[in-house]
Image (spheres, grey):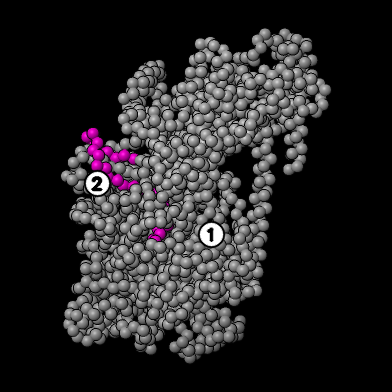
């Protein structure tokens, strides 16, 4: 006994010392980390973008073990159980306004998501197990985030893009739920993944009413793990959580017009969110707030500065710039970061950095921006503005059109389009549910209003037609357009299918959704490089610096399909039954009728006449025995067939029929 | 022989009884039909809001005085424009204002569509319209379209507000309607409760209100990418600054509802401001009743308006209507005194008003011409109405501008808010109804009774005529009796039971002629520089020529057997009446009101007409009266007569011209109204009647039926294929066999870089789905065909057999049962 205990103790001690050694040895790289950040950006249409960014990371299990201090256990289990290599889940309400909020910068490319839920995941399992893993993952996420993500388990609702949507061949699954209503019950579980929840740090700003009052909000969860990569030096699991909201600062002059001449609204954190920051989340490694001035805004400000003061243009990063004649910030930034690597433009965007750790309860952080002079600028646009709409009317067929319009002259001079004759490549990925039966051979490409007879503008195309009740139709395509293109359009015709009665959703008359198409411009990189190299450590700036394609989502479309009148089952049943009864009754009657015999029988019956009493008796007898008997015909003197009993009966039946008919219509 | 005959089954006995008393039955049924039509106002029910999600009036209106003063400023600014040379001043101003509000704007240029009638128009679907050759840039109409995106909405649905105005010469009333829309738009750009996008269409009505709205809708639903250059030439040459605005067409999702807002200059004679609702769209389609209900509810309870729907004013003073109303009121009182629960009586004044409204509703639906710009929306399955506001004094537009803006703005805001609440599209309430007042309606279940009673005698009369024809042919009967015991197959039955085929052939030939005549106006219209009068006369001459030609060509189609002329006409009449019955029934499905009015005109005609020559033989008073009735009915049933009589009654006979009818007909076909065909068929029929009434013995009975079949077919095809009526259900309705592989060619396989794998799999799958489709459709066709055959066969058998039995024959159902068996085995 004693020996065993002592051995066990020894063993424990050994292990703990080993672990402590290991930890000390790799203290820098291998530890759980949590950072938080907030990026604020004034938008041209008098709104403010707030982008919260939280990142937790955990070193790989092999070196670190299974016990975590900061990293959410549920996510860790999710990754390990379903062997997720990368996953992104977003809940969005509202539409990203690409025209006035920008379509070229990393924020819009990463965080402008289609309405509802979008989920994609890449698995590290054999190909035949991917679908099973996907199903389990959707169920797990559904429970975790209080959303109906489990509806994505059915094979009609997700697809496996080949190459257009992130390049993981075969093991990526993609699904969207455009109709999912997003609200606070989805935000709460999302906040639970943060170590400080919304009790401290930047997340304390997330006052539910003020967030959901905004024009757009999108909460996103992005997960990368290389737990299962044996070869690469692994960095463990990284969980990135972002919340992007577009808010309208409440101004005193509520009725003021959004005219060019009016002042941009002034705002502060407390006016936007109704709360202030009382300090950082104590476990976070960094807790910074940034205010970003876009490139166009910066150049506009410089011009104004020049006009008013005539001094140098580098004034914006001057020390006491926050009391300049154009705008005023309530706090002095810790540092000013300038964008570099943007060779085409002389002006570049500017970030003002504020450190939350400098503030505490007695002196809460409440950043404010006050405009003194009216300023107007335009956001950077994606090279082409993509929109999608339906054509045609009626319940039979229609067409989907994706139109790409050039957003302006300045963008065509961007990367890859510098000289004439070069081509712009556009990647389109579109999933269409099976009841919208797209005929891919009807694809037409219009460039500058002219129908292209050849398909030379399509560099590559992959189509998997939908299979009824099994899989949706997927179209992936790379378009090559000339650089100077003004408008381009794609049309695809479709037939509207019929659903089985039990396949209709509860609100069938609303119509059916075609999820957003993803349009990505592969020649363009949405990233902002920054001068300071050590800044790379900060995840929120990493996100901005990450080199990704410019991506935008098109609108969700609503297709009205033929819908049975669910409110009239009674009518339908009665009318169908009547028609069937009449039809089959008369058919059977005609088929098994032998007229000759009938006649003979009737004649012989008519020959022997009976009294009324006997006939009644025989009728009764026939009823009892079930044997057919024909009542003897009463010799009627009148040649017409007036039979009052019959008439009364018929009138009765007709009255009932009319009543039934009317009542059935009145049900409607 | 009478005693020996066995007694047939009760249903047949009933049928025989009705057939043998067809005269009595038809008189009773027709009277009952007309009476129940007159009783419809009494039977109307109060409207109710059926869709719970609408919740009208549950929110306090948010439109404040500030918004209204903005709107007023807007109105004054519009009216301050002195000259409007290009017509672009107002669009530019609206654009600036919408941009200031933070909305999206675009301009939609259009040319007036010279809506040429095309004979095959019904089968082709909406064409792009013809662009006139000699247009100038100034002749473009410019619609201004402003869009507010719902802050947190997903942009799948939209609500459309339409304000028509004349950009060349704007009146104060039109400016007011623009001001209302602007005040509302400025409110809606701020609110947070929107879930559907708002589209404001300021429609340039220089080419007519309907044209502007219809052309915008057409471009919304059929984006023609090729036309961009065409209009951009003008944009560049005419208005360089507008080129920036012409940044393509903006879309806003599926439309949930549309409201046309108009302000009228005319004053009401009432102590309240009035709101007139126009709802009838093309071919008698109506918007969902719930839309009218919420407007009515909000206008009456929210803003204290007096809501009206159109009525035929001349009927308000009709003495016969008043006395009828008095009778009904008396009866109602009597019934109420017997049992307090039977309170069906309504006061005289209300009855008269209801009838006038009902008549107008029936007339507008029957005409098939939309009563306003809202009609264009219904063609795309969007529920829409026009709201016309008329102030109590005509001068008060200036003085009470603020008040009108506030009230109407709040009303429209309430409607928008209600529609915005909708989760599903309008589907709960009625689509088939007739309005008797803004808050009372007659549903389809009630008004079908009148029609059913009216057309019920037709098959009976047809059957009885058929049996008469068989009875009065002794030779044929002997043949039949002779051949029956022998049970040998002889050509004899052909002469008796199949002789109606000759009549049917006659009907068919006349129908052919009628089809030709229907297409004639298209060619007549091609003749340049001719007045309507000359066109009409050319058309008449041409149709007579074709008639003579066809007559010559077909010759006397009856085989000259021993049959007398009497039998021929009865047979012919029976076939015609039967065809008329089928046609009317089909028409009632497509456009009830047209069928109802058609039945009112046709049924008495069908029942009374008898060849004049026959009557001339018997010189009795009765025959004389019958002949006179005949002529009167024919004359009344002739569409031009109806037109002129109606017009005379309503507007007076002062300015009557012969060409008016042509104009009227032209307007009908330019609106694609099914009534047009119906009417022309009717003309043709009556032409025949008038020409031949005193010449030939039987000709003029012909056209009744077939015509209606054509109308039926035209209407079906039009509605099912083009408009895609949302009766969602039968998979075969109008669905054309469309194969994915139809025009598929290997050259079109787009990708060239990945030549091997994906394309192969794609085409194979495509072909497979295509084959599936083929088999599916052929399977459906196979399934349906025998059923249809059986149904048709039994209908025929019943008709023929019943009438045969009346002619002392027993139904010989052995032959058909064998045939059916054989067919049944095949399937």
Disc 1 element = strand
Q: What chain is tagged by disc 2? A: B
Q: Residue at x 70, y 10 (%)?
A: A635
Q: Where's residue B322, x and y in %?
A: 34, 21
* A337 up-or-down from B482: above or below: below
Residue B268: say if magenta.
yes
Q: Is residue B74 left or right of residue B346?
A: left
Looking at the figure, which quarter contains the N terminus of chain A?
bottom right
Q: Residue at x 40, y 85 (%)?
A: A536
Q: Where's residue A323, x and y in %?
A: 19, 79
Q: What segment carries the magenta color?
A: B249-277
Q: Where's residue B201, x and y in %?
A: 34, 54
Write down the residue under mark 2: B173
Residue A167: say if magenta.
no
Between the C-alphas of marks 2 and 1, the distance is 43 Å
**Occupied quadrant, residue B733:** top right
**Occupied quadrant, residue B17:** top right
Q: Residue at x 76, y 40 (%)?
A: B825
* B809 up-or-down from B218: above or below: above
Write down the residue under mark 1: A493
Q: Nearer the viewer, residue B86 or B520?
A: B520
Disc 1 crowd, CA 10 A, few/some/many (<14, 14-19, 20+): many
């Amino acid at each position: 006994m004693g020996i065993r205990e002592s051995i066990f103790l020894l063993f424990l001690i050994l292990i703990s010392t080993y672990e402590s050694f290991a930890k000390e040895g790799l203290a820098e790289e291998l530890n759980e980390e949590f950072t938080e950040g907030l990026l604020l950006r004034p938008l041209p249409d008098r709104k403010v973008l707030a982008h919260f960014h939280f990142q937790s990371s955990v070193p790989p299990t092999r070196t670190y073990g299974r016990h975590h201090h900061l990293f959410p256990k549920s996510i860790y289990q999710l990754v390990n159980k379903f062997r997720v290599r990368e996953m992104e889940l977003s809940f969005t309400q509202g539409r990203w306004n690409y025209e006035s909020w920008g379509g070229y910068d990393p924020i819009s490319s990463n965080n402008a998501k289609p309405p509802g839920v979008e989920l994609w995941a890449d698995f590290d399992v054999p190909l035949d197990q991917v679908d099973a893993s996907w199903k389990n993952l959707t169920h797990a996420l559904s429970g975790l985030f209080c959303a109906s993500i489990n509806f994505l388990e059915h094979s009609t609702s997700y697809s496996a893009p080949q190459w257009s949507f992130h390049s993981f061949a075969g093991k990526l699954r993609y699904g969207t739920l455009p109709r999912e209503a997003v609200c606070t019950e989805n935000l709460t579980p999302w906040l639970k993944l943060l170590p400080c929840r919304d009790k401290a740090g930047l997340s304390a700003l997330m006052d539910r009413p003020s967030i959901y009052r905004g024009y757009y909000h999108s909460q996103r969860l992005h997960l990368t793990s290389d737990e299962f990569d044996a070869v690469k030096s692994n960095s463990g699991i990284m969980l990135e959580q972002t919340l992007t909201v577009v808010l309208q600062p409440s101004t005193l002059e509520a009725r003021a017009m959004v005219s060019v001449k009016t002042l941009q609204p002034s705002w502060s954190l407390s006016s936007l969110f109704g709360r202030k920051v009382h300090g950082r989340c104590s476990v976070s490694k960094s807790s910074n707030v940034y205010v970003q001035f876009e490139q166009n805004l910066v150049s506009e400000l410089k011009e104004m500065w020049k006009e008013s003061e005539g001094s140098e243009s580098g004034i914006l990063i001057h020390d006491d710039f926050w009391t300049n004649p154009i705008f005023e910030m309530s706090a002095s930034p810790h540092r000013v970061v300038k964008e570099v690597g943007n060779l085409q433009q002389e002006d570049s965007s500017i970030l003002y950095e504020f450190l939350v750790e400098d503030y505490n309860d007695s002196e809460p952080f409440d950043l404010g921006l006050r405009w003194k002079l009216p300023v107007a600028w335009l956001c950077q646009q994606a090279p082409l503005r993509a929109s999608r709409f339906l054509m045609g009317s009626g319940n039979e067929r229609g067409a989907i059109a994706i139109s790409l319009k050039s957003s302006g002259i300045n963008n065509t001079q961007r990367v890859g389009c510098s000289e004439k004759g070069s081509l712009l490549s556009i990647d389109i990925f579109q999933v269409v549910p099976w009841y919208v039966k797209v005929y891919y051979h009807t694809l037409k490409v219009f460039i500058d209003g002219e129908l292209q007879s050849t398909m030379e503008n399509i560099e590559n195309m992959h189509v998997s037609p939908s299979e009824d009740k099994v899989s949706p139709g997927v179209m992936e395509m790379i378009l090559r357009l000339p650089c100077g293109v003004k408008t381009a359009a794609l049309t695809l015709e479709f037939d509207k299918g019929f659903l089985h009665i039990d396949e209709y959703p509860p609100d069938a008359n609303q119509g059916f959704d075609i999820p957003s198409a993803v349009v990505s411009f592969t020649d363009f990189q949405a990233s902002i490089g920054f001068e300071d190299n050590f800044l790379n450590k900060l995840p929120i700036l990493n996100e901005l610096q990450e080199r990704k394609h410019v991506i935008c989502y098109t609108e969700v479309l609503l297709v009205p399909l033929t819908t049975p009148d669910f409110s009239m089952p009674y009518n339908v049943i009665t009318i169908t039954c009547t028609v069937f009864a009449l039809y089959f009754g008369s058919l059977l009657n005609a088929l098994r009728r032998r007229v000759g015999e009938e006649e003979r029988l009737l004649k012989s019956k008519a020959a022997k006449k009976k009294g009324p009493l006997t006939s009644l008796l025989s009728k009764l007898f026939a009823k009892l025995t079930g044997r057919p008997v024909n009542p003897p015909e009463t010799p009627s003197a009148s040649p017409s067939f007036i039979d009052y009993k019959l008439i009364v009966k018929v009138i009765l039946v007709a009255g009932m029929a009319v009543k039934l008919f009317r009542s059935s219509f009145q049900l409607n | 022989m009478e005693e020996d005959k066995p007694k047939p089954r009760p249903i047949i006995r009933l049928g025989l009884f009705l057939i043998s008393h067809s005269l009595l039955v038809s008189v009773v049924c027709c009277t009952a039909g007309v009476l129940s039509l007159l009783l419809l106002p009494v039977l109307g029910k109060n409207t109710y809001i059926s869709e719970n999600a609408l919740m009208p009036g549950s929110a306090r209106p948010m439109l404040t005085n500030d918004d209204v003063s903005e709107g007023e400023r807007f109105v004054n600014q519009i009216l301050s424009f002195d000259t409007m040379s290009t017509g672009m001043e107002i669009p530019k101003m609206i654009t600036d204002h919408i941009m200031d509000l933070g909305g999206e704007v675009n301009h939609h240029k259009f040319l007036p569509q010279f809506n040429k009638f095309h004979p095959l128009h019904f089968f082709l679907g909406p064409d792009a319209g013809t662009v006139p050759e000699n247009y100038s840039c100034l002749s473009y109409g410019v619609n201004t379209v402003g869009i507010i995106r719902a802050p947190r909405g997903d942009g799948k649905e939209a609500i459309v507000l339409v304000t028509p105005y004349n950009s060349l010469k704007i009146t104060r009333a039109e400016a007011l309607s623009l001001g209302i829309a602007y005040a509302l738009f400025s409110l809606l750009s701020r609110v947070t409760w929107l879930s559907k996008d708002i589209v404001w269409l300021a429609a340039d009505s220089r080419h007519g209100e309907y044209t502007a709205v219809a052309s915008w809708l057409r471009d919304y639903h059929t984006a023609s990418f090729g036309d961009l250059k065409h209009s951009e030439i003008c944009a560049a040459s005419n208005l360089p600054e507008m080129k920036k605005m012409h940044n393509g067409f903006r879309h806003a999702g599926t439309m949930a509802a549309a409201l046309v807002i108009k302000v009228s200059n005319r004053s009401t004679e009432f102590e309240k401001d009035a709101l007139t609702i126009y709802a009838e769209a093309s071919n008698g389609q109506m918007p969902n009743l719930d839309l009218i209900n919420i407007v009515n509810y909000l206008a009456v309870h929210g803003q204290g308006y007096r809501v009206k729907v159109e009525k035929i004013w001349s009927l308000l003073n009709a003495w016969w209507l008043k006395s009828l109303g008095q009778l009904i009121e008396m009866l109602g009182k009597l019934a109420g005194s017997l049992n307090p629960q039977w309170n069906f009586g309504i006061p005289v004044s209300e009855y008269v008003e209801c009838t006038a409204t009902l008549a107008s509703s029936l007339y507008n639906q029957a005409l098939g011409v939309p009563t306003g710009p809202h009609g264009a929306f219904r063609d795309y399955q969007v529920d829409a109405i026009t709201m016309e506001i008329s102030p109590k004094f005509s001068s008060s537009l200036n003085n009470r501008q603020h008040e009108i803006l506030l009230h109407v703005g709040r009303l429209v805001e309430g409607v928008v808010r209600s529609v915005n609440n909708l989760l599903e599209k309008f589907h709960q309430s009625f689509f088939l109804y007739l309005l008797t007042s803004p808050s009372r309606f007659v549903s389809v279940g009630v008004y079908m009774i009148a029609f059913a009673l009216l057309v019920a005698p037709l098959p009976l009369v047809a059957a009885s005529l058929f049996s008469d024809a068989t009875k009065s042919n002794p030779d044929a009967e002997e043949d039949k009796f002779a051949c029956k015991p022998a049970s040998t197959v002889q050509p004899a039955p052909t002469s008796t039971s199949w002789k109606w085929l000759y009549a049917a052939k006659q009907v068919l030939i006349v129908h052919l002629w009628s089809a030709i005549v229907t297409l004639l106006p298209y060619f007549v219209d091609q003749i340049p520089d001719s007045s309507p009068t000359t066109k009409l006369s050319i058309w008449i001459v041409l149709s007579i020529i074709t008639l003579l030609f066809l007559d010559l060509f077909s010759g006397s189609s009856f085989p000259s057997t021993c049959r007398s002329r009497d039998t021929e006409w009865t047979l012919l009449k029976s076939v015609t009446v039967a065809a008329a019955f089928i046609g009317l029934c089909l028409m009632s499905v497509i456009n009830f009101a047209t069928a109802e009015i058609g039945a009112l005109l046709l049924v008495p005609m069908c029942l009374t007409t008898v060849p004049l020559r026959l009557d001339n033989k018997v010189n009795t008073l009765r025959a004389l009266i019958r002949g006179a009735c005949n002529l009167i009915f024919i004359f009344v049933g002739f569409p031009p007569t109806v037109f002129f009589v109606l017009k005379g009654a309503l507007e007076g006979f002062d300015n009557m011209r012969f060409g008016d009818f042509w104009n009227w007909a032209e307007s009908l076909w330019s609106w694609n109204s099914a009534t047009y065909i119906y009417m022309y068929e009717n003309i043709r029929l009556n032409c025949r009647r008038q020409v031949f009434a005193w010449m030939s013995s039987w000709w003029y009975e012909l056209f009744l039926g077939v015509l209606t079949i054509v109308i039926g077919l035209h209407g079906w095809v039009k509605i099912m294929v083009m408009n895609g009526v949302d009766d969602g259900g039968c998979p075969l309705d109008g669905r054309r066999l469309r194969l994915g592989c139809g025009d598929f060619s290997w050259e079109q396989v787009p990708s060239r870089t990945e030549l091997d794998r994906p394309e192969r799999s794609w085409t194979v799958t495509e072909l497979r789905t295509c084959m599936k489709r083929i088999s599916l459709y052929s399977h459906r066709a196979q399934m349906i065909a025998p059923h249809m055959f059986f149904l048709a066969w039994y209908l025929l058998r019943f008709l023929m057999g019943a009438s045969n039995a009346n002619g002392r024959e027993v139904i010989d159902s052995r032959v058909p049962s064998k045939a059916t068996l054989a067919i049944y085995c095949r399937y």
